């Protein structure tokens, strides 16, 4: 026995993942993780990091200065993004205001510090903080894209060869090449 569902009875309102997410426990965990990482990094750079940096070679010292500055910048961008999302969730900021602020806070794909020359010469604690920040940044970047760009486009279900046939058609003329089938 098949059952027909009358879809006109359902509301046409789309549920926003972004709106649901920023009011979820999962967001709260990411928020705590991000703010905790900011605090851990600041404490490290002001205490043990200073002592460890003094013991580095000149080349490693330059890498330390570069990576600590990049880490601090990345963490401040993530903290700003998290604070904006929380402000929207708590009604302290409108979505329109958040969008205006979005242009000031850049959450973009970044190069991995682990691919930078002399990364392995850095103190182990700084390396770990950088890796933790990169992982958190990846998660926030993905969330930012989902919030501001919407779901990813559907993959075109065409034949994998169709692109090659299109190129051949352009090269040899539309009447010379045709798709099999």
Image (cartoon, rainbow, N blue to C red):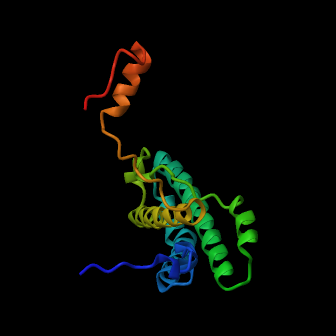
In the current view of this chain or complex, which residue is farthest to the front? 1
Give x and y (percent) for residue 33.
49, 78
- Tell me: residue 142, above or below residue 170: below
- Tell me: residue 125, above or below residue 26: above
Is 87 left or right of 25, judged from the image as shown? right
Q: Nearer the viewer, residue 96 or 118?
A: 96
Question: Image point 31% across, 39% down: which residue?
Answer: 159
Q: Quadrant of the N terminus?
A: bottom left
Q: Nearer the viewer, residue 119 or 85?
A: 85
Is 40 left or right of 106, judged from the image as shown? left
Question: Image point 48% across, 82% down: which residue?
Answer: 29
Is 139 left or right of 88, judged from the image as shown? left
Give x and y (percent) for residue 90.
67, 86
Give x and y (percent) for residue 172.
39, 13
Q: Nearer the viewer, residue 128 or 101?
A: 101
Give x and y (percent) for residue 167.
40, 23
Q: Quadrant of the C terminus?
A: top left
Question: Image point 43% across, 53% down: which residue?
Answer: 154
* Residue 83 position by quadrant: bottom right
* Residue 19 position by quadrant: bottom right
| Count of numbered circles on the image | 0
- Tell me: residue 165, above or below residue 87: above
Q: Nearer the viewer, residue 131 or 45?
A: 131
């Amino acid at each position: 026995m098949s059952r027909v569902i009358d879809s006109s009875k359902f509301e046409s309102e789309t549920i926003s993942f972004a709106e649901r997410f920023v009011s979820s426990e999962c967001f709260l965990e990411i928020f705590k993780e991000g703010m905790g990482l900011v605090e851990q990094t600041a404490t490290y750079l002001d205490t043990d990091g200073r002592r460890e940096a003094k013991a580095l070679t000149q080349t490693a010292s330059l890498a330390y200065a570069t990576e600590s500055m990049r880490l601090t910048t990345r963490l401040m961008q993530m903290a700003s993004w998290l604070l904006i999302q929380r402000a929207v969730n708590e009604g302290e900021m409108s979505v329109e205001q958040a969008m205006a602020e979005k242009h000031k806070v850049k959450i973009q794909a970044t190069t991995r510090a682990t691919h930078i020359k002399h990364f392995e010469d850095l103190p182990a604690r700084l390396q770990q903080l950088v890796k933790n920040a990169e992982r958190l940044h990846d998660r926030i970047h993905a969330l930012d894209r989902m919030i501001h760009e919407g779901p990813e486009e559907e993959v075109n279900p065409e034949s994998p060869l169709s692109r090659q046939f299109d190129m051949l058609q352009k090269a040899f003329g539309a009447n010379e090449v045709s798709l099999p089938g």
